[in-house]
Image (cartoon, rainbow, N blue to C red):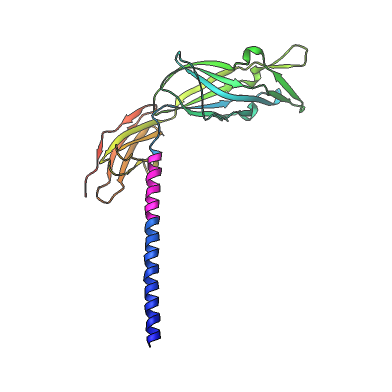
Amino acid sequence: MFGLYENELDYSFKTNHFMKLKFSTILSGVVIMAATVLAVSCQKNKSSDKPRLQVRLTDAPDPNVKEVWVDVKGIAIKMGDSAEITLTNAYPGLYNLLDLTNGKDTILADAEIPAGRISQIRLLLGDNNYIITKTGQKINLTTPSAQHSGLKVQIQQDVTGGILYRLVLDFDAGKSIVKAGNSGQYLLKPVLRIISFASSGGSVKGVVAPDSIITAIYAINGPDTVASTFTQVGNGNYMIKDIPAGSYTFSYVPGDTIHKTATKVVPVTLGQITIVDTVKLEKK
């Protein structure tokens, strides 16, 4: 009997010890998870108020050749009369212009830029440009020395912080390839034009109080949640960028159990930033 009792004590001790260890492990996991969520939330809200520019490339069909390959090295812009800026987050490479016809395009850059007025854009080209004829022959394209610095196009467009702008360039392959007399050579004299330059949506920014908690914000249009974000701890700021114009219901869901959820009707205008009055969460 004593041996059985001793085993039961031993079993009880081990069980309790195991449960304490298990609870400690779970608690640690919850703390780590909460810290991770907080870090991610804060990271999401470090979004810049700078404008963002997407540059896309397209072309029209050319019945005279099978493929037209251009060597894109990058994109640069000028803001007013200031020095030229080479766009970061660009996608250099070889592009077949004839893949970009009938409404198709490809993205060349997606970068934050200063607010102000874009006066000029420059497409930077390399030397590895060629065509593939209908018979499958590859012919290298010679680039005139005047084009080595890239092709400049005037824009003269204002950009506002917090707005995404899409610039679509038409690289006219049919007009850009010129036969050099009877030499059998072809020259690449790029003809580039701007098809469109437009903001893709509107943005919304505001503040939620109290700022000591993380609040989730949902932009709802009809039955759909179009976008969401979190407030920053310490100032309660939030911003939702690039959503289609229209009337939205913004839902503010606090990350604690003390405060109530709040809602606001927010109008969003294309190419503009809507400033929402401070949302003060009430206690339950």
At x 39% / y 64%, what residue is drawn?
21
The percent coordinates of residue 24 (x first, y second) are 37, 61
Q: Position of residue 167 (x, y in %)?
A: 50, 24
- Residue 77 position in % (x across, y down): 50, 20
Foreground residue among 110 and 243: 110
**Percent of width and height locating residue 184:** 77, 16
Q: Quadrant of residue 234?
A: top left
- Residue at the spot x=50%, y=23% of the render? 196
Q: Is residue 34 magenta?
A: yes
Q: Residue at x 22, y 45 (%)?
A: 282
Residue 233 sits above or below residue 171 on the image: below
User: Closer to the camera, 148 or 138?
Assistant: 148
User: Total number of numbered labels?
Assistant: 0
Q: Is residue 204 above or below residue 65?
A: below
Q: Is residue 114 left or right of residue 235?
A: right
Q: Quadrant of residue 115?
A: top left
The magenta segment is 29-43
Q: Nearer the viewer, residue 206 or 244?
A: 206
Residue 11 position (above or below residue 54) = below
Q: Is residue 212 magenta?
A: no
Q: Residue extending furthest bottom?
A: 1
Tell me what residue is drawn at x 40 percent, y 60 percent: 25
